[in-house]
Image (spheres, rainbow, N blue to C red):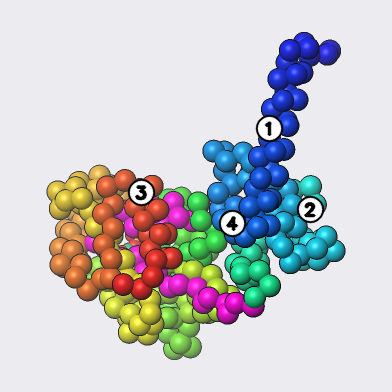
Amino acid sequence: MKPPEVDRIAGSRAAVAARRARAEVKRQIGSGERLAVEVLDAADADHPAESSLRVSELIGSIPWLGPTRTQRVMEELAISSSKRVGGLGAHQRVRLREFLLRRQGGSVAEPLEPGRLVVLAGPTAVGKGTVAAQIREHHPDVLLSVSATTRSPRPGEIEGVTYYFVTDAEFDRMIEKKEFLEWATVHNCHRYGTPRTPIEKALRAGRSVLLEIDLQGARQVRDAFPEARLVFLAPPTWDELVRRLVGRGTEDEEERTRRLATARVELAAQDEFDFTVVNADVQTAAREVVELMSVATP
Ligand code: 5GP
């Protein structure tokens, strides 16, 4: 069935406007007013021109890339020629972003900026896990380190995603083989450790890494990587922290008391950190942590 004449006219007007908006984005990239990576980062539902741009157009607008190289880059990144920026899969996005960052600066060969190591610590139940999950979902370019732990999985936790759940003997073996960047016994109970290799690899590739670990671990990382950025996630108030701890309901009375005691000590350690982010609202806290990955050293 043919659409009514008036709809067709409105539709073609909208299409022309959209094409013009995309052409403007390409012009901005070509003239150097905007970096291609900024366009990639802006592509969401609120920015239709950016998100409806084809990836090949995004890459092809970079001044020093002709059509042949653009095609080769697309093949190397395993992105089909019809793909639009807003339709990229999480892994494709990461690959494209890494490529654009590597090439940033046009024909001038810029040194590769090493990735930033950020440690997110703070008292128990302050919401580190939730903030980290938010970052994982919205910033696939940031590597979220997966720790090994000797504690048992809670319902819903996934091996290799939440943690690597290992036995005491395996943990001992990992310590012996120096596989950990840091490790600690948390709440006087189970052991947790950060596997070294994935982090070093990511940092070398220019990717930022986020560690969500306890205070003892944060101190060890600071000693091993003085350039690491330590972020303290604070509760809005102590009462709120207690409410969150009790509200979670995953620990028994004895465990809760132990965790509250740890939290009190952890809260007092705030001054050792480079930055404090107050977790009043998860989205805002996650955004602030991500912003801290790019701000200049204080
Ligand atoms: P949960 O058992 O609730 O998942 O975590 C308990 C605590 O262990 C949290 O404070 C968390 O930040 C900390 N933790 C998780 N992974 C590591 C790690 O690899 N190293 C250290 N030092 N602490 C960790």
Callout 1: SS: helix
Dot 1 or dot 2, earlier in sequence: 1
Q: Which residues are magenta?
A: 109-137
Q: Quadrant of the N terminus?
A: top right
Crowd rating for badge 4 (residues with CA inside 10 Å; few <14, some 14–19, many 20+): few
Label 1 vs label 2, nearer the camera: 1
Q: Label 1 to label 2, Cα distance in Å?
A: 25 Å
Q: What is the CA distance from the residue labelled 2 to the residue labelled 3?
A: 34 Å
Instruction: Look at 22% across and 53% down and name the residue there.
Output: 235
Using the numbered discs, state the Cα–Cα distance from disc 3 to disc 4 in whole angstroms: 28 Å
Rendered residue at 68%/32% (across/down): 17
Ligand 1 placement by image quarter: bottom left
Decide whether residue 164 is among the magenta residues.
Answer: no
The amino acid on which the numbered mark 4 sits, given as a three-letter code, is Glu
The earlier-in-sequence mark between 2 and 4 is 4
Instruction: Give the x, y percent position of residue 204.
Output: 55, 79
**Which one is closest to the eye, mark 2 or mark 4?**
4
Q: Position of residue 256 (x, y in %)?
A: 21, 56
Direction from residue 146 to residue 282 in the image, left or right: left
- Tell me how far mark 2 sits from mark 4, CA to CA: 27 Å
- Viewer-proximal residue, 235 or 177? 235
Q: What number is the disc on residue 33?
A: 4
Residue pictured at 51% horizontal, 65% vertical: 143
Nearest the eye: 106 or 248: 106
Residue 17, numbered label:
1
Query: Which residue occupies the foreground of this view, 154 or 68?
Result: 68
Badge 1, how many Cα within 10 Å: few under 14, some, many 20+?
A: few
Q: Which residue in the structure is indicated by mark 3?
A: 284
Check disc 2 and report the residue beneath it.
Answer: 80
Whether residue 104 is visible here, answered yes or no, is yes
